[in-house]
Image (spheres, rainbow, N blue to C red):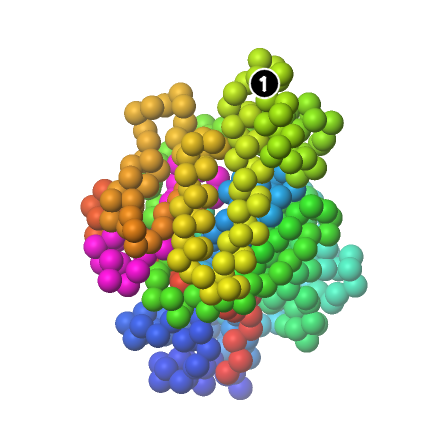
Amino acid sequence: MSNIKYIDFLVNEGNIPLFRELYGRNSELLRQQAIRYTKTLNRFKEVFGDKEVSVFSSPGRTEIGGNHTDHNHGRVLAGAVNLDNIAIAAKNNSDIIRIESSGYETFEVDLSHLIPYENEFSTPNALVRGINARLNELGYKIGGFDAVIDGCVPKGSGLSSSASFEVLIGVIVSHLFNEGTLDPILNACIGQYAENVFFGKPCGLMDQVACSVGGLVTIDFADVANPIVKKVDFDFESTGFSLVITDTRGDHTNLNNEYAVLPKEMKEVAAHLGCSVLRETTLEKVMDIAPSIRQKVGDRAILRAIHFECENERVVDEVMALEKNDFKGFLQLVIDSGHSSYMYNQNVYVSGNIKEQAVSLGLAYSEAVLKGAGAWRVHGGGFAGTIQAFVPEDLLERYTTTLNHLFGAGSCHPLFIREKGAVKLDF
């Protein structure tokens, strides 16, 4: 006999304390989550039948500090957020994984073929195949399962829907076939491997770690093969602030070169100091050599190198402020980070397209509402996309109304830092 009816009963009764940890205490949001879980449970039953199931959740993530530092082996500060991917999953006693996921076509992955396929690049199939291939290589058990996944991490939001999906698959395999023994950091590394090797996209490890571990985490990439991950002990919910991510709805088309040139310019400065990346040198050395290399690398490259060195140290200061419960000091550091990205790193708008500066506008509106009370900065890669703000409760309605007026209804996503990473929900 399946447990779907029992889980559905608990969900609708609201008798799940873990829901409050994942989604907060707002009764309307909890009601919406109950509806969402019920629909996903029913969809699983329609597609795959009435089976004994397990339920999983994996959060999105937000970058809080360390803007464009990871690619030069720097430090970052990131947090898991309460927008998540959920999955209803069950073993199917075969070598086939069958997944129905909102926003994607239903697909299957045959576990008897665990090598990369070029025609699968940039597909969820590739991620699932790559994760299971790596788990198998490392001696973990793998097997076929059926799953229905519902995603609430918006694609293109800068909240890393792909990393959330990756560690969700990892935690499903961990619990269905390995008694939940997969370490969260290893789960993150496996997701990164799948994205690099099977999906065909170079990426760092920040996104996967934040989604897998949960809460606030700081990561030091000095040794990229063995990054140091530390969980930051801070109760964000007690601050009375919301973390608001706003989609400025800018056009990401033709930005690949902007993203590629940025780390390249940083590394050109490092090369003139005999280093491969900027982490191997210091701000003082960058500023000392700058006059002699301006004509060779250009002034923007030097400014970006200055941003890296300052931002890398700023992450340390942000972590220290949080650990000392100095939230006011932390907010000022967030503002400083945003100013550095704008002035020195220059990843807020594309210099060749001055008519489109949505991120700049969003930051200007944010400052108008939050100056002296909150914090605001560019979020993630920049040039287009999202901004981040820390908004006190008494300004939340005004802030979201203002930004939605600028970018359109539904642009703003008020969030909080969720302590749980990718998890199996125990009913």
Residue 232 versus residue 5: which sits nearer the camera?
A: 232
Locate residue 49 relative to residue 277 in the image: left or right.
Answer: left
Residue in view at x 58 percent, y 38 percent: 309
Locate residue 121 relative to residue 156 in the image: left or right.
Answer: right
Locate residue 340 relative to residue 402 in the image: left or right.
Answer: right
Placement of 190 over or under 299, stated as above or below: below
Q: What residue sits right under mark 1 in the picture?
A: 291
Residue 403 versus residue 175: which sits nearer the camera?
A: 403
Does the stretch in magenta take in 254? Answer: no
Q: Position of residue 21 (x, y in %)?
A: 44, 74
Locate residue 269 relative to residue 374 in the image: left or right.
Answer: right
Count of number-bearing discs: 1
Placement of 9 over or under 169, stated as above or below: below
Residue in view at x 53 percent, y 47 percent: 314
Q: Position of residue 288 (x, y in %)?
A: 62, 25
Q: Secondary structure at mark 1?
A: helix
Residue in view at x 47 percent, y 65 percent: 325
Residue in view at x 46 percent, y 69 percent: 235
Placement of 91 over or under 384, stated as above or below: below
Q: Position of residue 89 (x, y in %)?
A: 55, 70
Stretch of the chain drawn in magenta: 380-400
Q: Examine the rendering and report whether any part of residue 58 can be seen.
A: no
Q: Examine the rendering and report whether any part of residue 375 can be seen.
A: yes
Does the stretch in magenta take in 394? Answer: yes
Q: Given the current orientation, which residue lies at the most extreme top position?
A: 295
Q: Position of residue 166 (x, y in %)?
A: 58, 56
Q: Amino acid at mark 1?
A: Pro
